[in-house]
Image (cartoon, rainbow, N blue to C red):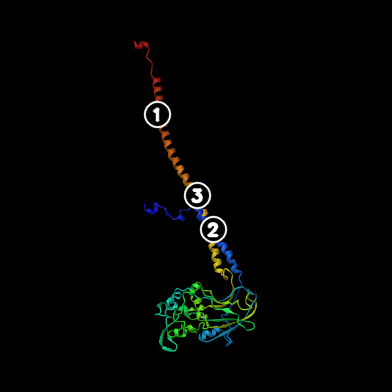
Amino acid sequence: MPASFQKNSGSAFKQQPSPTKLQLFFVIGAIMILIRIYLHVSNSVKEFVYDYTDCISQENPSFSCAEILEMDTTKACTCVIPLQLPEAFEGDVDIFYGLSNFYQNHHQYVKSRDDQQLLGALGPVSNTCEPFARYPDQNNMGMTKQVVPCGAIANSFFDDILNLLKKDGNPVPVLNTGIASPSEKKKFRNPPNSQTNLSEVYKDYVKPPNWRKNIWELDPSNPDNNGLQNEDLIVWMTTAALPNFRKLYRRLNRTTEGYNFGLQAGNYTLHVEYNYPVHSFGGRKSFIILTTSFMGGKNRFHGINLIVVCCIGIVVGCIGIVVGCIGILLDVIDLLIRFLGISFIVGGCIGILLDVVFDLLIKRYALLNRSNKEMANVTPRSPIQCV
């Protein structure tokens, strides 16, 4: 017999009694329900969403900016959109841009980057960046140079510029730092000699073909947020798992007077520098204002996911109870069968013994009866005959 059948696994989980396993499933279900209630807080945050995909061009009101970019992707187009916030957004306020039908999770797209280059090592470019690894220099079309940052992810960088203005025309104070996670920021560095002029550092390289700005022009006012360390770039390079996603764009600067308690209700104007075409892949673009809680912003997907998981945990627990009851019933039946089997054996032996005893008694009785009959049939002799 194989050893696997001779000895059970020594796992503590497998060796524990069944009730403990069932309790585990119920505990998981209960925890998930509590987390779902916890996430209900995130659904109470305030949200404002405006789809500006087909906004009308200020330069040519006969067309939308999307139509103008379809004709010429290099043209500049701006939109001025009046917005009204029906209620105040109190506390921390974040501004997001949203994209739909954009598959950042495609396998080849996710691989199309050079992590060593993003860390500031401007050596030979990785082949994973092809076909966005090398590109002709715009100033000298006969010369091909390495692209920084290379790859499809960087080439598709979202470059719309969104500015929210108050009714009086003054811009709403926002921060363009603190939008990328610290763990992701560690993966992006300018070259070691970047303390000097970044344009000199990157002069022997070219920008991705779809970019309107050079790498050193992403945030010239803040050297720590320029070049490969730009947080807008870092946020974009962190690929989304789903085709419809939001990415953090700006944070409200609550240290500015008048914004200490958040964003007030009222009329605003959204000024859009429309650079990012989406009609080619059937996408949509949104401008989103969102308050945050200790659980972050709204996330319906996580809520639905947790509901499904907790239901599965409870169902599995119920199935475990049923299976446990069936197991107990089968154990009882097994004991009964074993008991009845022993009884049948003992009964059979007793039956055989009784058959033998009864057979002997019957034979003995028959022998005695025959002897009595023979004695009765014998004629006694007279004394005379004997003489």
Q: Secondary structure at mark 2?
A: helix
Disc 2 marks which residue?
27
Mark 1–mark 2 CB contact (< 8 Å)? no
Mark 3–mark 1 CB contact (< 8 Å)? no
Q: CA distance from mark 2 to mark 3?
A: 23 Å
Q: Residue furthest left?
A: 387
Note whether residue 229 is visible.
yes
Question: What's the amino acid at mark 2?
Answer: Val
Category of crowding for the residue at label 1, using alpha-carbon neighbours closer than 10 angstroms: few (below 14), some (14–19), many (at least 20): few
Note whether residue 202 is visible.
no
Disc 1 marks which residue?
363
Front-most of 11 and 105?
A: 11
Category of crowding for the residue at label 3, using alpha-carbon neighbours closer than 10 angstroms: few (below 14), some (14–19), many (at least 20): few
Mark 2–mark 3 CB contact (< 8 Å)? no
Q: CA distance from mark 1 to mark 2?
A: 74 Å
Residue 254 position within the rendered picture, expressed as x and y whole percent measured from the top left: 60, 76
User: Mark 3 vs mark 1: which is more N-terminal?
Assistant: 3
Q: Secondary structure at mark 3?
A: helix
Q: CA distance from mark 3 to mark 1?
A: 51 Å
Q: Nearer the viewer, mark 3 or mark 1?
A: 3
Quadrant of the rendered image containing residue 367: top left
Q: Nearer the viewer, mark 1 or mark 2?
A: 2
Residue 369 position within the rendered picture, expressed as x and y whole percent measured from the top left: 41, 24
Residue 169 position within the rendered picture, expressed as x and y whole percent measured from the top left: 62, 84
Residue 196 position within the rendered picture, expressed as x and y whole percent measured from the top left: 46, 84
User: Mark 2 vs mark 3: which is more N-terminal?
Assistant: 2
Position of the C terminus, as image quadrant, is top left
Question: What's the amino acid at mark 1?
Answer: Lys
**Can you tell which mark lies on residue 328?**
3
Quadrant of the rendered image containing residue 53: bottom right
